[in-house]
Image (cartoon, grey):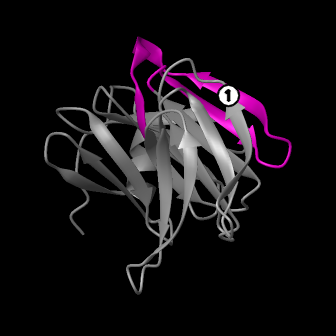
Amino acid sequence: MCAATLWDARSGAQVTQLRGLRNAVRALAFSPDGALLATAVAEGAVVLCGRRALAALAAVNGHSDRVASVCFSPSGALALTGGDDSTIRLWDVVRHSELVAVEQPGGEPVTGLAFSADGAMLAASLGDGSVRVWDTGRWRELGWLSAHGAAATCVAFSPDGAVLLSGGADNRCLAWSTRDVLHLVFSSTTGAVDGEDRE
């Protein structure tokens, strides 16, 4: 059996553990208010836990392979998961139900997910080195970035949403201006955008 452990960041002391997970924990995320913890486990499920007692409240299943990433929307009402089955899935946290499932072309695993602070954009890093960006209002893909020479492993937005960061197995961390990148991605008809923000 595997476990997720909660630590006190100031003292370094162990607070509690969530035990009894059948497979390895591959990703963790707190809800914005800190009340819930989502644990993505290798068998394709996400376990939602109450933070105070770190007790399992519900499990959501939908992925056919390992879940590699999980994040909450800024409101905390939704959770996103990405997995080795090349899908991104949107979940209603209250009802524990799946709302949207988006399959990535080429069967590439989804390695990282991030919402912008206002919730308007979603970014995903993929195993082929690309980063894809979606408009969450309509859940449609806005464009993609040919970012890394090896697998892209993680993505994050700056708190003000002005910068999108991506990290990869090519030992690079790239900083993209979302204003410039989105303009280029949305207006380009010649192919992928590849570059770094050097402001």
* Vertical arrangement, residue 12 with respect to residue 150, above or below: below
- Indicate the amino acid at tag 1: Asn
Residue 145 visible from this viewpoint: yes
Q: Position of residue 94 (x, y in %)?
A: 84, 49
Please give the count of numbered marks on the rendered protein: 1
In magenta, the rendered stretch is 84-112
Q: Is residue 113 part of the magenta span, yes or no?
A: no
**Residue designated by label 1:** 61
Task: Identify the element where label 1 is drawn.
Answer: strand
Of 57 and 86, nearer the camera is: 57
Of 9 and 169, nearer the camera is: 9
Q: Position of residue 133 (x, y in %)?
A: 49, 40
Q: Is residue 99 part of the magenta span, yes or no?
A: yes
At 25% from the left and 33% from the top, the residue drawn is: 151
Q: Residues within 10 Å of mark 1 (few under 14, many from 20)?
A: some
* Vertical arrangement, residue 36 with respect to residue 34, above or below: above
Please identify the residue farthest to the bottom as the structure is shown. Answer: 10
